[in-house]
Amino acid sequence: MTDPERTKKPAGPCVVVIFGASGDLTRRKLAPALYNLAQAGLLSEHVAVVGFSGSSFADEAFRQRLGDDLRRFAEASFDAAAWDRLAARIFYSQGDAHDPAAYARLQQALARASERFGAGRNYLFYLATPPSLFGEIARQLGAAGLTSEDGGWRRIVIEKPFGHDLDSAVALNRELQRIVDERQIYRIDHYLGKETVQNILVFRFANGIFEPIWNRRYVDHVQITVGEELGVETRGRYYEEAGALRDMVPNHLFQLLALTAMEPPASFEANAVRDEKGKVLQAIQPIVPEDVLRRTVRGQYGAGTVLGEDVPAYRGEPRVAPDSTRETYAALRVLIDNWRWADVPFYLRTGKRLPKRLTEIAIQFKRAPAVLFRQSGVARPEPNELVLRIQPDEGIALRFGAKVPGAVLRIGPVDMDFCYADYFGSTPSTGYETLLYDCMNGDATLFQRADNVEAGWRIVAPVLDVWNAIPPRSFPNYAAGSWGPGEADDLLARDGRAWRTP
Ligand code: BG6
């Protein structure tokens, strides 16, 4: 993780090569993130960027296109002079990712850019391409001699999804590790770039008062929710393949779970943090096939109303089969078999077309004994709850019971609420700034190690198998704009619990 002192220094010299340079991720996230880093004074004077894709652009046309998008997405905060300074360092190299000649041209473009800006021989290869190209590009880079660290470092950033299941993730890891060393591979999970996600560790380990109660003696259960009000938009084809479970759980939700449940690492050094995350994921009790239908819930949205707007069912979305059985909602009950968390359920849920966009981790503590209040005829006090709001409206709230003023003894829940924006203001961020900056500095703490990715897939593997073998009975089973299928409520009701209504 980036320490505050170091963030004041610009990252080291390098050339950033973006594969998939004409794609959405480059336009919406990577170019704006580079711009924000430049604005914050965190890019080296000796940095250059080379975009690579199959489309044909002159350097100037490529810069123009990125600039136009940036102006559109950044709105008020766009500073044309600052963009021009960055744009002068951006170049474009056209080529087919399967064609060795394209890598020879790229090599020349890299050498030119590097010489012009004194970037040295440090190359960061960002694979913002469809996953089917990850292995191919790495192989071609290797064959062109671009991955060997002669006179500079070479790093490869791999976007999500990393594999489609356990076998394909293991195969991709093996393939990459044949070409480069594990320390050269930076697997992205963009949730780890979110300030509030990084804050989970700070909150837990920089404050003396929470850690002593962060365990099975005090915690009743944990709920992790990643909800989106959006549907699948234009990504029907991808989503028909992926579904909610693959798309969100082994990566984003398990990262949130790992940061919430891990032991304190010995340091914030990359491997120390990733070792601890790995241990938690490995301690997750395997979901045996016979238990899958009892411990998991899948759902698909039907037509409904979201934020006051009528929206179609998933089956009516573009590029989605009219009888699709793909899930757009997934919920799981997970147990972590270690001393800290034995018997404390972690309930995870994620879905499209829920009532609003919301990511939060809610720690629900055990109730206070009811004895005292039973005698005074007062309703049993509600359990304390600590909610880490990851997005939007980033903050942390602690709920506790207080006496409602008046002659009669009544207890009401109140919140102590910290809002990020109130304390720190808000700075423009795509979530990719820290990730790019850390990668330029060789800090892999916020990136996934091979074993972490495989552990995530290993946990969901039986769920994928059983869901695949037993088709859902009644899709669609939740209306767009609701908090998901009724079965998800049953999942908690069986344990005498209920989902929070955020
Ligand atoms: C992506 C998923 O990884 O994360 C998308 O593929 C999802 O389906 C997105 O919408 C959510 O990210 P964020 O940052 O908007 O919460």
Image (spheres, grey):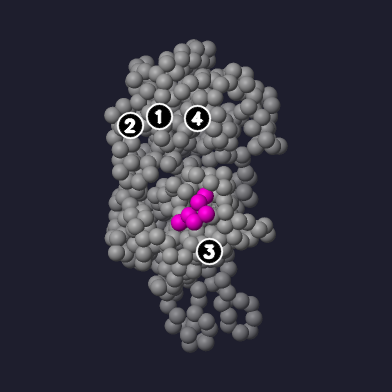
Residue that badge 4 annotates:
20
In x, y percent, where is residue 165? 35, 46
Q: Nearer the viewer, residue 6 or 350?
A: 350
Q: Amino acid at mark 3?
A: Tyr
| Residue depicted at 67% across the width and 32% down the height | 71
Residue 176, label in figure: 2
Observer able to see residue 16: no
Mark 4 or 3: in front is: 3
In x, y percent, where is residue 280? 33, 52
Q: CA distance from mark 4 to mark 2?
A: 18 Å
Q: CA distance from mark 2 to mark 1?
A: 9 Å
Circle 4 crowding by C-alpha within 10 Å: few under 14, some 14–19, many from 20: many
- Report whether 203 appears left or right of 334: right
Q: Is mark 1 within 8 Å of ligand 1?
A: no
Q: Is mark 3 within 8 Å of ligand 1?
A: no
Q: Amino acid at mark 2?
A: Leu
Query: Mark 1 or mark 3, which has the lower sequence index?
Result: 1
Residue stretch in magenta: 320-325
Mark 1 or 4: in front is: 4
- Report whether 446 appears left or right of 90: left
**In magenta segment, residue 323:** yes
Q: SS for tag 4?
A: loop
- Residue contact between numbered discs 4 and 3, judged by CB atoms under 8 Å: no
Question: What is the quadrant of residue 84 in the picture?
Answer: top right
Q: CA distance from mark 3 to mark 2?
A: 41 Å
Q: Quadrant of the N terminus?
A: top left
Residue that badge 1 annotates:
156
Q: CA distance from mark 1 to mark 4?
A: 14 Å
- Residue contact between numbered discs 2 and 1, judged by CB atoms under 8 Å: yes
Residue that badge 3 annotates:
478
| Residue depicted at 48% across the width and 44% down the height | 238
